[in-house]
Image: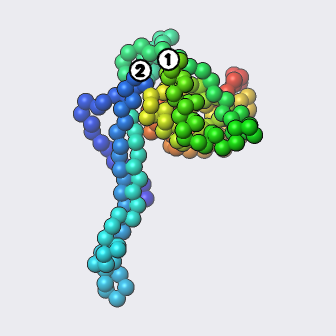
Amino acid sequence: MPLELVLNIKDPHQWSPEDPFLYEAVVTASADYTAGWWGIGKKDIPEYNVSSDMLPVPFGMRDFKAVGRFFHLNGEMYKMMGSNITLFRFFEDPDRKGLPWDREWVKKMFIDIPKSLRWNGFRMCIGIAPKFWYDLADEYGLILQNEWPMWQVRGWNEQMDKEYTDWIWQDGSHPSIVIWDAMNESKSS
């Protein structure tokens, strides 16, 4: 059952790498039954009078667009400074073992070192990162070009449409993702 909720936030605090302000929406579902076994409602039983599920969803509000030859973030011209991360190499490297899943290692490699170099972002090349990488970028303020892990491929339109749609729904609330790159090194058809 789809549910739509519209929030009006007056004068929203805008997210940026320099001020990575995040809001948090908390979605709660509860088990509130009015009828139960032999006429006893579960709401009358203490263990059923609690929320059955809760999902906190952090999100940021920002405006990012191309204006002429330049990018603008929250109405101001913005320079993206950083590099590429070719993620599949991290995950396939036997010497790295579980490091790409270690939050402290990822924070140091993905946030602390780049920030010390005055970088503000990355192109996530040929691969989608685990969710907590995007959470770190949101929290500490990195802008990302998020790239689908395909290149120079044709065909499979129906499957690709589904995967792209799922990808956007999965990562769409991350303010750090400012560019959605559908394919690496694509050739025009």
Residue annotated with mark 2: 73
Q: Where's the N terminus, which quadrant? A: bottom left
> Residue at coordinates 34% horizontally, 39% vertically from top-left?
23
Q: Is residue 13 left or right of residue 169?
A: left
Q: Tags 1 and 2 in contact by the CB under 8 Å rule?
A: no
Q: Secondary structure at mark 1?
A: loop
Residue 112 position within the rendered picture, expressed as x and y whole percent measured from the top left = 51, 27
The CA distance from mark 1 to mark 2 is 17 Å
- Which is nearer the eye, 20 or 69? 20
Compared with residue 77, is residue 26 higher up or lower down, i.e. above or below?
A: below
Q: Nearer the viewer, mark 1 or mark 2?
A: 1
* Circle 2 SS class: strand
Residue type beneath disc 2: Leu
User: Which label's residue is closer to the chain start, 1 or 2?
Assistant: 2
Apparent side of residue 70 relative to residue 74 in the rendered image (left or right): right
Residue 168 visible in the current orientation: no
Q: Residue at x 35, y 74 (%)?
A: 47
Q: Nearer the viewer, residue 92 or 128?
A: 92
Mark 1 crowd level (few <14, some 14–19, many ≥20, 10 Å Cα): few
| Quadrant of res 12 | top left
Instruction: Residue 184: name its quadrant.
Output: top right
Quarter of the view holding residue 46:
bottom left
Residue 173 in picture, x, y percent from top left: 45, 39
From the image, tell me which residue sits under label 1: 118
Disc 2 crowd, CA 10 A, few/some/many (<14, 14-19, 20+): some
- The three-letter code of the residue at mark 1 reads Arg
- Above or below, comparing residue 119 to residue 20 in the picture: above
